[in-house]
Image (tube, coloured by chain):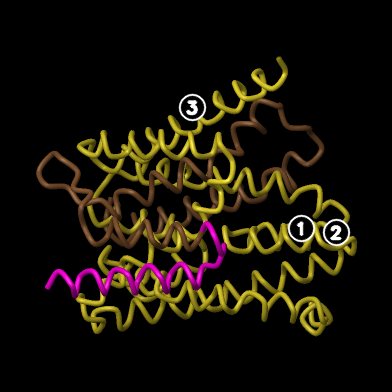
Chain colours: A yellow, B brown
Amino acid sequence: MREHIASKDFREGFVEMLPACIGLLPFGLVCGVGAAAAGANWLASLGMSAIIFSGAAQILAAQLVAADAPFAVIVLTCFVLGLRFLMYSAAMAPYLRPLPERMQKVLAFLLTDQAFAAAVRRFNASDDHHGAGLHFLGCGAALYLVWQVSCMVGFLAGNLIPSAWSLEFAVPLCFIALLAPLFRDAPSVVAAVTAGIAVLAMSHLPMRLNLIVAGLLGIVVGTLADLARERWKAR
Amino acid sequence: MEGALKLWAVIVAVGALNYLSRLSFIALFARRSMPPLLARALKYVPAAMLTALILPMVVEFKGATADFATPRVAAALIAAAVAFATRSTLKTLGAGMAALWLLQWARG
């Protein structure tokens, strides 16, 4: 492990990720505040960020725990939200196949939205799979460390942040940074518009069930749009 | 379920499912090829799930009707334009927060 961390690729990945990490700081603070609001002690707050390691799932789990939703609903909602990791995993698999199994398992744990975006760029740009793997490890390590610290600071000191700053708005902004670039692809726009209309139309549903239903509806309609586009092109 | 126990159960269950999802095609089903329809559907998971997650945080409700004429909606649209053009988390965040503060200040 030590020779991994000393490598040039690891350091490059670590440094390349730092600007994105700064952008995620407010998101981490909000996650820490959410954990506190859900009644977590410092250890449970650290458990959320260190074990779940996904801002979206942490915020949603904290909100649902605070609202006293049933265990099964919380876990199912977070699972559907995490379906995107299946897609990231499938996209990364061919690149990671030449790497040792232990490395694959570590990199899978570090596979977040932000690390995925950075890793795909690097693996596409370089033929050196081992080097790109170390670069990914560097990206993931930077994100993991900054995430733990910012969540803990949010947990301990979140109530000191003035509410007039509207810091919680940083959370949708971080997701917008991931979403908007997808709009170059027409079926993705169809999937997003469908999910967006559905989630607002069903906002009266209890326990954020509108999120699961709207998300799944968006996936189905997006897939149908993709199939329709293919047929149209084949004619 | 008692509070602290339920929270830890959620942490472990969500953490395990998250890790299994991340590990899925890298290790668990590495030897299998993915059904083509599943591969196609997975491409649209991020767009659909992220939108369903974002909108309730941006759009406020006045009773049963959604209110789109708010500083938050305008700031989110500005941030989306910046994200589309730059793909940068930091610039998106900077533009979105600056727009929100300005619009809230202008509104008084």
- Judging by the rendered image, the residue that carries numbered circle 3 is A221
The reply to whether callout 2 and callout 1 are in contact (CB within 8 Å) is yes
A229 to A150, vertically: above or below? above
Image point (26%, 34%), residue name:
A202
Give the letter of the chain under mark 1: A
**Dot 2 amino acid type:** Leu
Sequence-first disc among 3 and 1? 1
Element at label 3: helix
Instruction: Tell me where residue A165 sits by quadrant.
Output: bottom left
Asked if marks 2 and 1 fall on the same chain, the answer is: yes
- Judging by the rendered image, the residue that carries numbered circle 2 is A99
Image point (56%, 36%), residue name:
A186
Viewer-proximal residue among A58 and A95: A95
Element at label 2: loop
Instruction: Tell me where residue A216 sits by quadrant.
Output: top left
- Judging by the rendered image, the residue that carries numbered circle 1 is A104
Asked if marks 3 and 1 fall on the same chain, the answer is: yes
- Is residue A38 something that shows in the picture? yes
The answer to whether residue B61 is magenta is no
Give the letter of the chain under mark 3: A
Residue B46, disc: none
Work out which quarter of the rendered image holds the N terminus of chain A and state it. bottom right
- Is residue A44 something that shows in the picture? no
Work out which quarter of the rendered image holds the C terminus of chain A and state it. top right
* Residue B20 point in image, percent of width and height: 61, 48
**Dot 1 amino acid type:** Gln
Measure the C-alpha gap from mark 3 to mark 1: 33 Å
Start-end of magenta stretch: B84-108
